[in-house]
Structure formats: structure tokens, C-alpha cells
Amino acid sequence: MTKNITKEDIIQKLKLVKDPEIEIDIWTLGLIYKITLEEDGVEILMTLTTPLCPFADDLIALVEKKVSELGYDEGEVCVELTFEPLWQPSDEVKMLLGI
């Protein structure tokens, strides 16, 4: 696979994925911990606002769908969930949330 996809391209797609409860994109929320571009695809390490998030499967599927729009084939976008460290909103996000 010789695609000229950059991390910035992926970030732009991730900014289109909104947390369904908070209505803020997952990039701004800080849910994306790591993006690794591999020769055969991309790996995304992310978390959720809470380990009990009822939308976990939907969010993962949406991340895979949006990033795949860059030209990745099925199976080339791998999303891994982690809860270490637990998500903590940044000061910017706290202001957006009014807390």
C-alpha cells in the first residue's frame, strides 16, 4: 500500500466523530491517545469518557468508517480501546462543558 496519508489527514477525519452524549468531537475531547501509521494501515489508540460508555461500539465503528474514507481497505484501520490513563477533560474541554 502506497498511500500518502498523514496523521493530519486522520486527525481531520477524527474531528468529524462526535461523542453522542457530549456533542463534541473525540479529538477535541482528548479521547485519541495515539495514531500510528503503518505500512499496511493505521492504528488508533483511544479511550472513552467513561468505561461504561453505552456508545463504545458505535464510536469505534464510526472512527473506523471515517478514517477508512481516506482510502483504507477493510481491516486496515485498527482501533484499540484503553482506559489507562482514565480520561480527564482538559481545561479547554471543561470550559466547553461549563464545568
Image: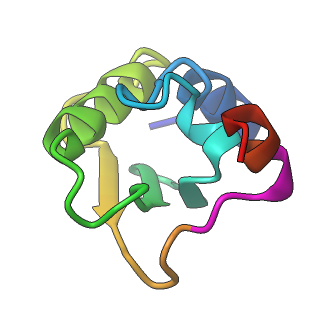
Q: Is residue 89 magenta?
A: yes
Q: Where residue 51 appears, x then y in whole percent?
A: 27, 67
- Would you say residue 88 is visible in this rendering? yes
Q: Where residue 60 appears, x then y in whole percent?
A: 27, 41
Residue 97 vs residue 36, the one in the foreground = 97
Instruction: Name the residue rendered at 47%, 24% in the picture.
Output: 17
Instruction: Name the residue rendered at 58%, 27% in the picture.
Output: 24
- Would you say residue 6 is visible in this rendering? no
Q: Quadrant of the N terminus?
A: top left
Q: Where residue 72 appears, x then y in whole percent?
A: 37, 28
- Whether 57 is drawn above or below 31: the answer is above
Using the rendered view, name the quadrant where residue 45 is placed.
Answer: bottom left
Using the rendered view, name the quadrant where residue 6 is placed.
Answer: top right
Using residue 35 as the reference point, say whether residue 70 is left or right of it. Answer: left
Instruction: Name the residue rendered at 31%, 33% in the picture.
Output: 64
- Whether 70 is drawn above or below 83: the answer is above
* Residue at far front of view: 99
What's drawn in magenta, residue-wise? 88-92
